[in-house]
Structure formats: C-alpha cells, structure tokens
Image (spheres, rainbow, N blue to C red):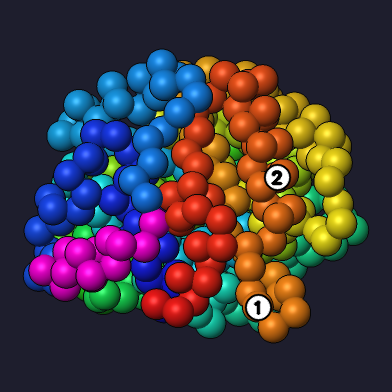
C-alpha cells in the first residue's frame, strides 16, 4: 500500500507544469486514481522542484515537440522502481497527456521478469548476461540500463505487453540495439500477424540498430536470433509514433555510484538514437547505514558521475530525486531513521555542485517520523 500512495504522490508533484496533479489523466480508471489521491492527500506535502531550474529547459522545450517527434525520459533508480514500479505510472500519465504508445527500452535479460506487471518478458536459458548488480568476469560493456546480454546459437526473447496501462498495451515500432554480430547474423521477428527476418549487419562503432515497423498495432513479439553467437544485445525498444517514452533503468541495491560502470562509448554513440530530454536519478536509500554520518565518498562519486552524464548529454535536463523516509525501531516505536536526513543533505550538496534540479522526496512524504503515517495508512 505504501508504494501505491508513493506513486500517486510522486506523479502529482514531480514536475511544476503538472501543478494540477493528475486531473488530466483521462483513462477509464482516472476517477479511481483521483479519488485515491484525494483520500490520501493528508499524507505528505506538495514540494516544488529546487536547484538549477534553468537546467530543466531542455525537457520543457522538448514537450512542445511531442506531436512530431519521440521525446525520451531515462528513469534511473534502485529497487524502488524495480519491476517498472513508479515508472509505469509516470509513463502512463505522460503518454496520456503528450502521446506515445509502448513501454520503450527493455533489456534482453533481467531478474525482475517475475513481477514486472507492465509486460510479460521471457528469454531462453542460453543467454549469458552481466550487470551492475551481478558479477561481470568477462568485462562485457554495460548498456545504458546497466545490463549486457550475450546471445548464444539459438537464443530467443519474447515480450507481451499487458493491458493494465492503455498507453503501453500495444506498439508498432520495434528497435533492436546490438553489436558484435557477423555478416550473416539476423533475427526472426514474429508478431500476432506477421513474421519477418531482420538483418543484424554491423557498421563501424559499438552501436547498431535494426528497425521493424508493423502495419498495425501489436502487443507481442518473439525474437529468434540466428547466427548471433556472442552478439551483444543492448536492448529492445517497443514504441508507436511520436510522443513520450519513459525508459525504466532499475538497478537494485544500488546507490547511483555504479553509474560509472556504464559503457561511455555506447552512451555517446547511442545519443542520436536514444536522445534523452530528461534523466531522473532516483537513489539514496541503499547507502543509509546505522551509525554512519560521513558520506563524502558518495558525494564525490555522484558529482563525478553526474558531470560525466552532462558531458555525454549536454542538452539533457537532469533531476535528482532524494531518498525517502526509512523506518527504524527505537524500543517499541518505529521512527524515521535519522541517518536519512544526513543523506538528503549530502544529495543537496551534490545538486549544488553539479548545477542540476532537485526534488526532495523526504520532505514530500512529510516531516520527521512521517513513515509511521504511511505505514498506518
């Protein structure tokens, strides 16, 4: 229940241009969403974005172009957004407002497939894969989502969009991002209505794309990779025309420090194809540690990571979302962990040093010990 309320709160106040909350959400269940927000509005506070608001201009300017182009948001975070949690609602509301259909970027392999409720994702057992949250003994270059999947001789993938979110239940465009293929490498793509073979030829550089456009909307695809042994599959994106696409890049157990493990060459070369107008960084809770008060190491690491992102994406807005409340037991009572405040203050220093925008999730959830209200609700 806590996560449901958190999603509604986050969606209603994440962006100043959405000051009316979620009233523009016109799906059949909009009344339910708005009623839930009304019932639980007593929990939490309306908090404005602070920091360098001028840096958000890239994102706001891009919103005026959603009728003619695809505008992308990269939502990075820890297990708070694992399984498309929070991101799914943000994507749905944005697509209802600005257009666009489809879940966007998906990895070939991941460990959240059993509880990702926006799409049913399956893959064969013969894939080799590594990520920022697994060992990477072969030192595979990690894609933008912190994952790299390596195909075998008969690898396959399947994606079946679920119908819980109207805007993401179907798509027409399928984009496969890859590297390290051979001249005869290809993929057999199957939909409910079609079967086609796509060439996975390789150009110079580390980023290649194969594109398929269906004649009518589909909600499922199967990809069978042929002659693709050792091919690096960065991911697959499912889209439908111009509008907003919000890509979920969940890195469980992470603090954001591991962003430095993403392959910089991939990020630079993919910028034209995955041109993000906004990057959201949603980290913090995984470094909260009892008795720890000095987070200088974290501050330095995140400043370095954010500056590198700004160099790679010079015309992209960046928003850091603070960590939220975390409960800790004191005797028989549950109170807000006092260490969280120290982490939030450190995140404010990171924002000031990097010149990005900031949204204080801790304050939005309520004052000290607000975690008790959330649990009781």
* Horizontal and vertical percent position of residue 339: 74, 53
Q: Residues within 10 Å of mark 2 (few under 14, many from 20)?
A: many
Q: Nearest the camera: 68 or 179?
A: 68
Residue 112 can be seen, yes or no: yes
Query: Could you give the CA–CA distance between mark 1 and mark 2, rounded to whole angstroms?
Result: 22 Å
Q: Name the residue under label 2.
A: 343
Residue 183 relative to residue 14: left or right: right
* Label 1 with label 2: CB-CB less than 8 Å: no
Residue at 63%, 62% in the rendered image: 336
Residue 299 image label: none
Query: Which contiguous range is marked in magenta?
Result: 31-44
Residue at 22%, 49% in the rendered image: 21
Residue 370 relative to residue 218: left or right: right
Q: How many labels does the image show?
A: 2
**Any magenta on residue 33?**
yes
On the image, which quarter does residue 44 sit in?
A: bottom left
Residue 215 relative to residue 276: left or right: left
Residue 101 can be seen, yes or no: no
Per the picture, the main secondary structure of the magenta-coloured stretch is helix
Q: In this view, does 144 lie above or below 286?
A: above
Q: Mark 1 points at which residue?
A: 333
Q: Nearest the camera: 351 or 194?
A: 351
């Amino acid at each position: 229940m806590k996560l449901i309320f958190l999603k509604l709160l986050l969606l209603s106040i994440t962006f100043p241009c959405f000051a009316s909350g979620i009233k523009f959400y016109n799906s059949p269940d909009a009344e339910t969403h708005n009623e839930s927000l009304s019932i639980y509005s007593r929990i939490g506070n309306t908090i404005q974005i602070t920091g360098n608001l001028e840096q958000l201009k890239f994102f706001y300017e891009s919103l005026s172009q959603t009728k003619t182009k695809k505008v992308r948001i990269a939502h990075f975070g820890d297990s708070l957004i694992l399984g498309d949690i929070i991101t799914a609602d943000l994507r749905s509301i944005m697509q209802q407002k600005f257009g666009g259909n489809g879940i966007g970027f998906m990895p070939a392999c991941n460990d959240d497939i059993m509880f990702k409720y926006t799409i049913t994702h399956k893959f064969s057992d013969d894939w080799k894969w590594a990520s920022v949250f697994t060992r990477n003994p072969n030192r595979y270059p990690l894609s933008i989502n912190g994952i790299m999947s390596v195909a075998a001789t008969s690898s396959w993938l399947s994606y079946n969009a679920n119908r819980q979110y109207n805007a993401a239940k179907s798509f027409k465009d399928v984009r496969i991002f890859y590297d390290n293929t051979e001249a005869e490498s290809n993929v057999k793509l199957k939909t409910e209505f079609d079967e086609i073979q796509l060439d996975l030829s390789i150009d110079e550089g580390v980023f290649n794309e194969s594109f398929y456009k269906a004649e009518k909307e589909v909600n499922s695809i199967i990809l069978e990779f042929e002659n693709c042994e050792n091919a690096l599959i960065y991911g697959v994106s499912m889209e439908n025309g111009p509008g907003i696409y919000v890509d979920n890049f969940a890195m469980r157990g992470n603090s954001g420090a591991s962003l430095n493990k993403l392959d910089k060459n991939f990020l630079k070369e993919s910028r034209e194809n995955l041109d993000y107008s906004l990057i959201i960084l949603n980290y913090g809770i995984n470094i909260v540690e009892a008795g720890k008060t000095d987070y200088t190491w974290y501050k330095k690491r995140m400043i370095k990571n954010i500056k590198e992102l700004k160099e790679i994406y010079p015309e992209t807005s960046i928003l850091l979302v603070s960590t939220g409340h975390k409960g800790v037991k004191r005797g028989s009572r549950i109170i807000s962990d006092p260490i969280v405040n120290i982490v939030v203050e450190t995140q404010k220093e990171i924002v000031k040093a990097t010149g990005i925008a900031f949204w204080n999730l801790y304050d939005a959830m309520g004052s000290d010990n607000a975690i008790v209200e959330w649990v009781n609700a």
